Image (spheres, rainbow, N blue to C red):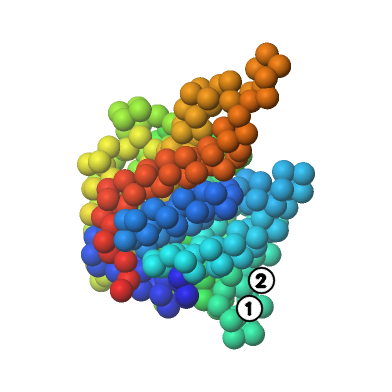
Amino acid sequence: MPIATPEEYNEMLDRAKAGSFAYPAINVTSTQSLNAALAAFAEAESDGIVQVSTGGAEYLSGPTIKDKVTGAVALAAAAHEIAKNYPVKVALHTDHCPKNHLDAFVRPLLAVSEERVARGEEPLFQSHMWDGSAVPLEENLEIAQELLARTSKAKVVLEVEIGVVGGEEDGVEAEINEKLYTTVADARATVEALGSGENGRYMTALTFGNVHGVYKPGGVHLRPEILKEIQDEIGKEIGKDKPFDLVFHGGSGSTAQEISDAVDFGVIKMNIDTDTQYAFTRPIVDHIFKNYDGVLKVEGEVGNKKAYDPRAYGKLAEAGMAARIVEACQQLRSAGNKIK
């Protein structure tokens, strides 16, 4: 099965950490963007992660329905079918879920996976993110403990955020200030609360100046050396090399060196959304500008059906997004590193 089993997902994460590479985690909002991600992973010969946020899941359920669980389940079902045609392993993940959406998103989806595992089947998603960045660290970790107990039994990996990512994504907003930098004390509290794998596997988004959204290189001060400091300090304390499986959020506009450093320091998953949104939309705009009198019925004419057929510009959009994902696979060194 191209959709990774829990064992294969753990192997993917282990291989990335041992081989100093990271998987692009691509946010999707439709089967078109799903197709683009799968095509890109296949072209790059890279396994990868497809993920959906609360807003993306709402959109997938239908703009008039706005049911996050329906949209997420629909995406998973589509991915299980469509991915069969691609020679790579793909993991399914749910992205940022703040406290006010847990009961309408992560917890119901976990219940689905619990029921599936109880029947001897695989979980629906391979990992879920709990975004506790907007609540005090103590509360963040208390909720993480509750979720980790459930995810570990359901053969699912939990992702937590320790620190704050600036900017805004799907209603989760934070100022750009000193809170964007996770401390060693924050990381120590995380290990004390969640363990270092013995209570279930989790990935950790430690923040080092990350900001969601659009910014030019140099517009945000990233300090990936913070990741090394935390890995080294906590690693010494618990006797484990690079104890955290790290996730890179808010990476749009990052330099190649910043990305490379982050991967060297233990990042095994990098979320990519803003850049791929633009890469998807840009070819559509180009098509419309070049075929203005075809996509529109100008001055009483009938237009050109081949120009306004959604497939005409949809294919271009998918190709544009796929090209950006291939670039990400190359930057993150996952290209050519698929499970044989």
Density class for disc 2 (Cα within 10 Å; few <14, some 14-19, many ≥20) is: some
- Which one is in front, 256 or 43? 43
Density class for disc 1 (Cα within 10 Å; few <14, some 14-19, many ≥20) is: some
Compared with 293, 73 (above or below) is: below
> Gap between marks 1 and 2, in whole Å?
6 Å
Is residue 60 visible from the viewing direction of this image? yes
Left or right: 5 as drawn, with respect to 299 = left
Query: Which amino acid type is marked by label 2?
Result: Val
**Residue appearing at x 68%, y 64% in the figure:** 108
Compared with 59, 84 (above or below) is: below
Residue 121 locus on image (x, y percent): 59, 81
- Which one is in front, 74 or 12? 74
Residue contact at pointers 1 and 2, CB within 8 angstroms:
yes
**Residue appearing at x 67%, y 19% in the figure:** 301
Is residue 157 visible from the viewing direction of this image? no
Res 116 label: 1
Query: Which amino acid type is marked by label 1?
Result: Arg
Rendering quarter of residue 172: top right
**Residue appearing at x 34%, y 49% in the figure:** 326
- Which one is in front, 288 or 6? 288
What secondary structure is found at the residue carrying circle 2? helix
Rendering quarter of residue 178: top left
**Residue appearing at x 70%, y 58% in the figure:** 70
What secondary structure is found at the residue carrying circle 1? helix
Residue 203 locus on image (x, y percent): 42, 62
Q: Residue lying farthest right?
A: 64
Residue 304 locus on image (x, y percent): 61, 29
Residue corresponding to mark 2: 112
